[in-house]
Amino acid sequence: MTDKTMTPEDVVSRLRSGMTLGIGGWGSRRKPMALVRALLRSDITDLTVISYGGPDVGLLAAAGRIRTLVAAFATLDSIPLEPHFRAARQRGAFELREVDEAMFMWGLHAAANRLPFLPVRAGLGSDVMRVNPGLKTVTSPYEDGETFVAMPALRMDAALVHLHRADRLGNGQYLGPDPYFDDLFCEAADSAYVSCERLVDDFATAVPQTLLVKRHAVTGVVEAPNGAHFTSCAPDYGRDEPFQKLYATTPWPQFAERFLSGDEKAYRSAVESWHEEQQ
Amino acid sequence: MKPTSTTTRAEYCAIACADAWLDGGEVLASPMGLIPSIGARLAKRTFSPDLLLTDGEAMIVGLDGAVEGWLPYRQHLTMVTGGRRHVMMGASQLDRFGNQNISCIGDWQQPARQLLGVRGAPVNTLNNPVSYWVPKHSKRVFVPRVDMVSGVGYDSAAAAGPSATRFHRIPRVVSDLGVLDFETADHAMRLASVHPGVTVEEVQEATGFPLVLPDEVPRTREPTATELRLIRTVIDPDGLREREVPAV
């Protein structure tokens, strides 16, 4: 069977400017940061990014790679407001399609099920309808006759997610408390790339319910230890809070210069030496 | 009732938050912020023992933190739409009919201050009871009209039709000055009680629109001796509550 292992650079070589890109995880939790960093090293831009936003959104926004963002929020969790997302919004750097987080979920479900939309009792009466003039409503064909928002499918060209374990075929396992929506991201995308903490030979001894992502929905697998850094990847590791604080308080050019100008290995050693300086 | 002179403002706030979950039944209490968390735990320890609590991540936990269930985001969203939840959210802005904003300040196209985004406020407000906690009652928060309707207020729900109003309910707003509700003919915000030591004028002065004022505004109820003991010795022994709402 097909060995789908590849490097972060291989993944990025399959992406193009102008694509619609889904990014898994939630807030500052289990974000495919190694893949996002590889993306930042390329000249890919003009992206439509679909994300339960965290520093993935902040990094891409700060670097000017986002044309349109589809999101319900962007947060660093322990730091409630994502500073680079905020700064970019306040200078009008990209277009926002702001939807509610349940609408977002139904958009993923619709895309994964090849439906144009799904009805949802959310959005009505809120300014989500005002700021998304393209959103339409749908009337129940049954006796109740209720009106709902028809949440359009969030179909994407490619999805990036980070899981704890994966095999070479593209099956992915999560070991943390929450699957987030990573399986849906993969199923909602024309191609999906799974980075993982560790490649394994098989899942013979795995708890079945942890096997979240199935290989038919995966195009490529990347072994990326610490690949969610500095977001949390419990139980393998927690969030690197001091480093996240540094990210949130350092002017972007300075942060990018020190941590993002080299490859993933250079990133890791830059993070390590920064931590040593803090001792 | 004679006020317990030693009861602090923060404790009145915690009591007023706890009362939001009175008669809640077997629902998920989703408190956002410290004082609402104290309130939810107090409610569960006393008059609403069937409440479900989360650990803020993916677990449903008891008062001692012991796990009793699993609630990842996708199931949490189902619980929201199923209605078996009463959330107490924060609000950067709140208006006369209970519209809430946590998205941004200023023009949405290019905001003066970008905040969180609407998060789950639109789905919450249309599907399960939503109360609000405002730790610092001021005209900056209580505004004539919010800049971005995130949580849906009574007037907005009514304008959107029966699907929006079917499960819509905003039971109360608790602030450091008092308790507000929408128990009026047109669901305009009413001052339901003032915390002891606060005057009605003070609340109106800190509010950016006219409040509905009953002839006599009652005082927020006193905690029982048991409630006070629970707050002080069991739920918040380190007194973190006094930092969120300082003594006046």
Image (tube, rainbow, N blue to C red):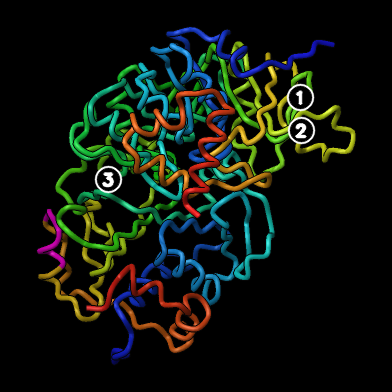
**Image vertical order of residue A162 relative to residue B217, above or below:** above
Mark closer to the observer (2, 3): 2
Q: Chain of mark 2?
A: A
Label 3, on which residue?
Answer: B99
Residue type at mark 1: give it. Answer: Asn
Q: Is residue A45 magenta?
A: no
Place of residue B215 in the rendered image (x, y in percent of width and height, measured from the top left)? 14, 72
Comes first in the chain, label 2 or label 1: 1
Judge left or right: residue A268 versus residue B122. Answer: right
Q: Position of residue A169 (x, y in %)?
A: 78, 18
Q: Along the line of sight, which residue is nearer the eye, A264 or B234?
A: A264
Q: Residue at x 82, y 40 (%)?
A: A207
**Which residues fall within the magenta stretch?**
B203-209
Q: Identify which amino acid the numbered label 2 is placed on.
A: Leu
Instruction: State if disc 1 and disc 2 touch (CB < 8 Å).
Output: yes
SS label for mark 2: strand
Q: Amino acid at mark 3?
A: Asn
What secondary structure is found at the residue carrying circle 1? loop
What residue is pinned by disc 1? A171
In the rendered image, which quarter contains the C terminus of chain B?
bottom left
